[in-house]
Amino acid sequence: MPFGTTWRGPAHSFVTFGFRGDSTVPGGRARDYVAISIEARREPGETYGAFAGLLNHFEILYVVGDEHDLIGQRAVITGDEVELYPIRTTPGKMRQMFVSMLERANRLRERPEFYNTLTSNCTSNLVDHVNAITPHKVPYGLKTILPGYADEVANAVGLIDTKLPLADARRRYRINERARAAWGRDDFSAAIRAER
């Protein structure tokens, strides 16, 4: 999710996990989704800054919520471009990733850590989780420090489930219009995944 249109570097990466829902009960859905966003924790009155993020100014925080809240905040409220890519993995590895992220969130509650713009940001922490499950799957480098290029890295190592060239995949999986159209609806998660 890049913050600007002239340079992709500054951005935010986060993941969502799908769960089978129960569509047989009133209000039940065929699939439910949980999003996890790794962020710099800002206290009242603080604003995020990349330089401040280098100076142990913020703690790291795992935000767990539904897609309407976490994706909607970015795609609808702030108007950031959001791409929602399908990931190529197994259900077992996805389950391991989810559990790993929740366990880390719980550890941070007991032993807080500092966010760092270069070494412990949204993308570098996601890379740590992926590499804990599949060692050396994602290489560390400048493109994991600059989250706007995380999709390029994920595509290069085969994590994005598409045969499209990356530029076409970015257009195909950009969900802003669908998110705005589905804002406030119960079927938000299904609507942002609908074919154009």
Image: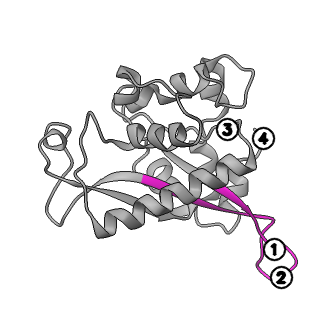
Q: CA distance from mark 1 to mark 2?
A: 6 Å
Q: Earlier in the sequence, mark 3 or mark 1?
A: 1
**Mark 2, residue position:** 25
Q: Looking at the picture, which amino acid does disc 4 mark?
A: Glu
9 up-or-down from 41: above or below? above
Q: CA distance from mark 3 to mark 1?
A: 23 Å
- At 81% across and 83% down in the image, what residue appears? 26
Q: Secondary structure at mark 2?
A: loop
Three-letter amino acid code of the residue under disc 1: Asp
Percent x, y for residue 28? 78, 76
Where's residue 14, x and y in %? 48, 46
> Image quarter for residue 59?
bottom left
Res 180 seen here: no
In this picture, residue 120 sits left or right of residue 96: left
Which residue is painted at 51% across and 65% down in the image? 65
Q: What label does residue 87 carry, if any?
A: 3
Q: Are marks 2 and 3 in contact (CB under 8 Å)?
A: no
Q: Amino acid at mark 3?
A: Ile
In primary-sequence order, the first of circles 2 and 3 is 2
Give SS at disc 4.
Answer: loop
Q: Which residues are magenta?
A: 17-37
Residue count near mark 2 (Cα–Cα under 10 Å), binned few <14, some 14–19, many ≥20: few
